[in-house]
Amino acid sequence: MKNKKGAIIILTGPSGAGKTTLCDALFKSFTNLRFSVSCTTRPARDDEIDGIHYQFLSKEQFQEGIARGDFVEYAEVHGNFYGTLKTELQTGIDVGWLTLLDIDVQGQINIKKLYGDYAVSIFVTTPSYKDLERRLLMRGTEDINSLQERLQSAALEMKQIPLFDYLIINDDKERASNEIVSVVRAFLCTIPRYDVQGFINNWAQH
């Protein structure tokens, strides 16, 4: 009998690696998938809605949440705080959702420690530094300082790949999309996600 509890899918990787495209592939394949709505102190962009894209908090509100222990993980990135609420993840596990997160390396370490068999971590990246630089330039959303910050952050993140369960090199959208869907399907069939003894007992009685 399959465990009815939900699961946590963690995506990490440099900005520009194509995580959004891979998220779209997951949403097309899993009807019970939902994005974790992270908290942030950065200002909302014109097309962003509070409570849907992020929960937008002031720095004071965020720091109060840290003091209360509300966050399972949080980080300061480029001068703004980002974090995931414990209640957001636990609710998903309890009701059977697949909760998708796009977080940094330290965040995935914290979540894996707390949720163990209910969390799978996937690192997504480009084939090379030059390829990432090209993609960021093509987006046209970064000034020179921001571009350099993102590239420096990416170089540091790459060193943490061994801490993850899976690596996807996004050099072909279709292949990478198929790979990430296969990873999640395989994860949902891992032994710890089953009531193995209950299944064995039931199997033996029929």
Image (cartoon, grey):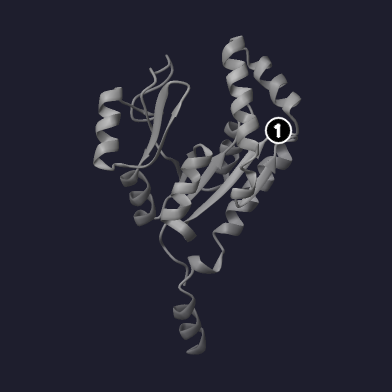
**What SS does tag 1 mark?**
loop
What amino acid is found at the position of numbered circle 1 in the picture? Thr
Tell which of 202 and 23 is nearer to you: 23
Judged left or right of residue 54, residue 176 is: right
State whether residue 142 is above or below residue 124: above
Name the residue nearer the viewer: 181 or 88.
88
The number of discs equals: 1
**Residue 170 in the figure: left or right of residue 9:** right
Q: Residue furthest bottom?
A: 205
Residue 157 x, y percent position in the rendering: 60, 35
Q: Residue at x 67, y 15 (%)?
A: 137
Please identify the quarter of the rendering in which residue 55 is found.
top left
Let me know if residue 117 appears in the view: yes
The residue tagged 1 is 126
The residue drawn where x is 62% and y is 52% is 183
Residue found at x 73% / y 42%: 175
The structure residue drawn at horizontal position 39% and vertical position 27%, both measured from the top left corner, is 81
Residue 30 percent location from the top left of the image: 53, 48
Q: Position of residue 185 (x, y in %)?
A: 59, 55
Residue 96 location, quadrant:
bottom left
In this rendering, is residue 186 above or below 150? below
Q: What is the crowding at mark 1: few (fewer than 14 residues within 10 Å), some, or many (at least 20)?
A: many
Query: Residue 166 location, x and y as percent?
Result: 64, 50
Give residue 56's quadrant in the image: top left
**106 or 176: nearer the eye?**
106
The reply to whether residue 17 is visible in this rendering is no
